[in-house]
Amino acid sequence: MLIVYNFLQVLLLPVAAPLLALLILGRRKYRERFRQRLGFGLRRRSEQLAALPGGRRVWIHCLSVGEVTSALPLVRGLRLRLPDVRIIVTVTTSTGMRVAEQQLAPWSDLVLASPLDLLPVVSRFIRTLRPDLFILVETDFWPNWLYGLRRQSIPAMLVNGRISRASFERYQRFRIFFRPLFSSFALLAMQTEDDAAQLRTLGVPARQLLTLGNLKYAQDAAPDRPAATRLSREELKLPADGQTWVCGSTHAGEEELLLPAFASLSADHPRLCLILAPRDPQRAPELVHLAHQFGLATIRRSRPQDSPARVLILDTLGELAACYHLARVAFIGGSLVTGGGHNPLEASRHGVPVLFGPHMEDFAEIARDLIHCGGAMVVSTPEEISAAVRRILEDHDAHAAMRTSAIELVTREAGVVDRHLDALTGLLAAGKG
């Protein structure tokens, strides 16, 4: 299949070349990035590796933004566990590169545009970078790249692997093409047992497969980040009695749905408290005015002289995580509008049942897992929000089930970085071959 793949490249490149030339020559950013992906300037940039102490090199490749964010806890953990290892990161997309330069560069030694999957280009990258281990994050399988690594006896490992239904169907349909790609890996670390089972169905030997969990669960668990101090109801000037609903990192357009839901619930639950934490604390005056329109008195965290009220607007930075332990139920903001959502794990780690809207694109896998295990529910309207909160407040069995499911999921995913690092260091220790 590799011969066919490269034959098609030779056949199609002359046809595509004029169009590519127009696109690349017409825009400077494309022109420079294309040169980088062909390997121009690679030797000069890689010289800084030779000047650094340490011998072994780990090459980590990410397709785009999602893979970069998944790689962050692994790169950070690798740097802390094996500080002498040289870490090289490549990224395919320009948006992914911008995020990598912000998030991965402080923990790595070199961040580069990834090579085009042309045999001479791939060979140049491998020969220049001289990796002892190659790590692919989630996806972006390229035949010449994997073949070049295998030819040089450089072990390859897939991390955070996942297979969607559409991908599985494609892999089955073109099994003759994909099976050699999967066989190029020394290890395939999958997120779930279902993902591993699908690869076994495709003929991947069990000895190549590991189920290590989802690295996205470690994104907000930096080893140098202090644990959030728990705030008490007294410190927040909330009434000592009753239950609490926390709405975290809300965006404009969401409070118009959340506040009427709270107002309707208050009729049957007069001791219910709401902690409303806007993503932008500067919106606090606007939220005070909006709450008053629904007949709700408020207190602002930044103004302790205010009279106590059952709606607290958390208009401070860095305190939201310290409030989740008080919650009977939590709503995750940025999800009723197209904001991509925020990390629900801050609440789930406390066993708090979670609600969010349909827009959790930035945390899609975690949202999916929480829904699947029963630790979260999706809501879209004030009526759905009110009904879901009411059920969690009033149905103790439903609350207990969601709480247990959330804790079990978070517990199962704990240690995901260490599991990946154990497998990774095992391949490094084995050496080439």
Image (cartoon, rainbow, N blue to C red):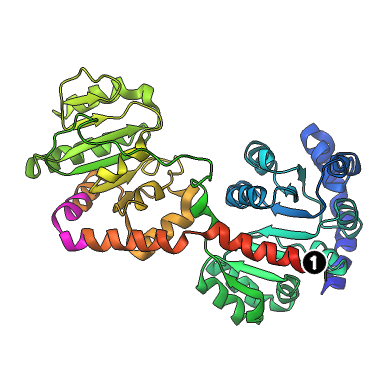
Q: Residue at x 76, y 62 (%)?
A: 142
Depicted 265 relative to depicted 432: above or below: above
- State the image quarter where residue 306 is shown: top left
Identify the amino acid type marked 1: Gly
Q: Is residue 36 left or right of residue 411?
A: right
Left or right of 229 in this view: 417: right
> At 32% from the left edge and 51% from the top edge, which residue is drawn?
350
Q: Report the side of 104 relative to 399 (left or right).
A: right
In percent of the image, x 22 and y 48: which residue is there? 328
Magenta-drawn stretch contains 72: no
How would you classify the magenta stretch by its main secondary structure? helix
Task: Tell me which segment is drawn in magenta.
Answer: 389-398
In the image, is residue 286 above or below residue 258? above
Q: Dividing the picture into quarters, in which one does residue 331 lie?
A: top left
Residue 32 at x, y percent in the picture:
82, 36
Quarter in which the N terminus is drawn: bottom right
Q: Most extreme residue toward the top, as rendered?
A: 305
Q: Residue at x 41, y 61 (%)?
A: 411
